[in-house]
Image: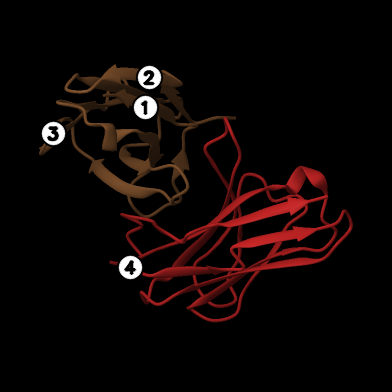
Chain colours: A brown, B red
Amino acid sequence: QQKVQQSPESLIVPEGGMASLNCTSSDRNVDYFWWYRQHSGKSPKMLMSIFSNGEKEEGRFTVHLNKASLHTSLHIRDSQPSDSALYLCAASKGNNNRIFFGDGTQLVVKP
Amino acid sequence: EAAVTQSPRNKVTVTGGNVTLSCRQTNSHNYMYWYRQDTGHGLRLIHYSYGAGNLQIGDVPDGYKATRTTQEDFFLLLELASPSQTSLYFCASSDDNQDTQYFGPGTRLLVL
């Protein structure tokens, strides 16, 4: 049973545009969320994490978390072709347990 | 940055063959994981370990065994490989807080 659902499966945005990716957990026990980025032919690397309700910003990347709805979103402003990658959402209960990955959103930023 | 290495990087075997995938981390992390990645499925956890001699079952363990011989080394064993096990395999490690998982470069396995 998939605990983490991501949408959309794929997304195409123009260079300079805003990309918005969504992630929801079906397990009410999870409360820690991560976003990983995986460029083609490479391994996943942690991009951002969020454990509290609200928003977290790092450069062009902003993550939101709503714990009541178990929903997190990743927003990339001023998208660049180098942002083209598979974005994986992950969740866990607390930060001392195994994490569950979603199937990912494939982002393509067109020049 | 944390270092995780995997070998071999590519492997071809035949149905029924015996395959061992190796992973080493030099980060002094206690947690190590084996995932497989297939198109449309993201990362699926096969086995994981909290330390030497410890093994935990993941979500897709059938057909796989694992051994954690030291804190640094974690092995994935396919004793009777099947074409359904053709996949990209990633090893990862994390500290006790499991805040961030650090992934190796991956092993691409083809079972003919």
| Label 3 close to label 1 by CB (< 8 Å) | no
User: Dot 2: what SS?
Assistant: strand
Q: Residue at x 43, y 71 (%)?
A: B30
Q: In which quadrant will I find the C terminus of chain A? A: top left
Whole-angstrom CA distance, mark 3 to mark 2, is 17 Å
| Label 2 close to label 4 by CB (< 8 Å) | no
| Label 1 close to label 2 by CB (< 8 Å) | yes
Left or right position of B83 against B33: right
Residue A68 occupies quadrant: top left
| Label 3 environment density (alpha carbons within 10 Å; few <14, some 14–19, many ≥20) | few
State the residue in front, A29 or A42: A42
Q: Which residue is mark 3?
A: A60
| Label 1 close to label 4 by CB (< 8 Å) | no
Q: Which residue is mark 4?
A: B2
Chain of the residue under the numbered disc 4 shown in the image? B
Q: Which residue is mark 2?
A: A11
User: Dot 4: what SS?
Assistant: loop
> Which of the marked residues, 1 or 2, is nearer the chain's N terminus?
2
Q: Nearer the viewer, mark 1 or mark 4?
A: 1
Whole-angstrom CA distance, mark 1 to mark 4, is 26 Å
Q: Which residue is mark 1?
A: A107
The image position of residue B88, as x and y in percent, is 60, 49
User: Dot 1: what SS?
Assistant: strand
* Dot 3 amino acid type: Arg
| Label 2 environment density (alpha carbons within 10 Å; few <14, some 14–19, many ≥20) | some
Task: Check if mark 3 and mark 2 are on a common chain.
Answer: yes
